[in-house]
Image: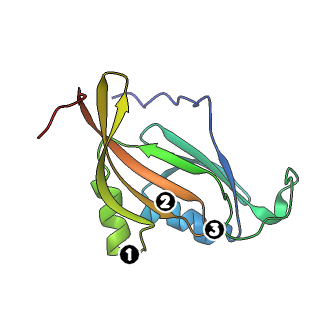
Amino acid sequence: MSAKTLVWQKLVPELAVSDFGKSLTFYTTVLGFKALYSREKFVYLELEDIQFMLHAAEQDSWQTGKLEPPYGRGINFQIELLDISPVYKRLTTANYPLFRPTQDAWYKTGAMLSGQRKFLIQDLDGYLLRFCQRLGSRPVGFSD
């Protein structure tokens, strides 16, 4: 059996975090990301084909302004997985609060509706994470 070839995604958000150890534990243990590699107070993470980098905020030489909680205001990260239920189960087992509960939504995309099951959380620093899975598509005007 051969090892999976690592594919570096073309867009990989790098998040400054206030407590690197707690964030690393949260992303790996609760959310289920795997650490692909790390160095002191930096880690490159992956879950399915979703990749993030985390680094300790106090080492941030690229900071464009003062970081104040919640971090990442004005942005949310859509994380599309094949099935969001394992992440949801780990979050509820950990009694982690949801920002928005699970819901199914259908969005008009031309003559079709695209379905998505989703829920949202804020990570330990307030970054908004939207976990979703595809529900397929159907014609506009279709009713259940």
Q: Residue furthest top?
A: 111
Question: Which mark is drawn over residue 28?
Answer: 2
Return the mark for residue 125. Answer: 3
Q: Name the front one of labels 3 and 1.
A: 3
Residue 30, image x, y percentages: 43, 65
Q: Is residue 141 left or right of residue 83?
A: left
Real-space Cα separation, disc 3 to disc 2, in angstroms: 15 Å
- Number of the label disc, if any, that sits on residue 54: none
Query: In which quadrant is the N terminus drawn?
Result: top left
In the rendered view, would you say 90 is above or below 63? below
Coordinates of residue 89 in the picture (x, y in percent): 29, 64
Q: Residue at x 31, y 46 (%)?
A: 105
Residue lying at 37% horizontally and 22% vertically, measured from the top left: 110
Q: Nearer the viewer, mark 3 or mark 2?
A: 3
Instruction: Say which label, 2 or 1, has the lower sequence index.
Output: 2
Instruction: Quote the CA–CA distance across marks 3 and 1.
Output: 17 Å
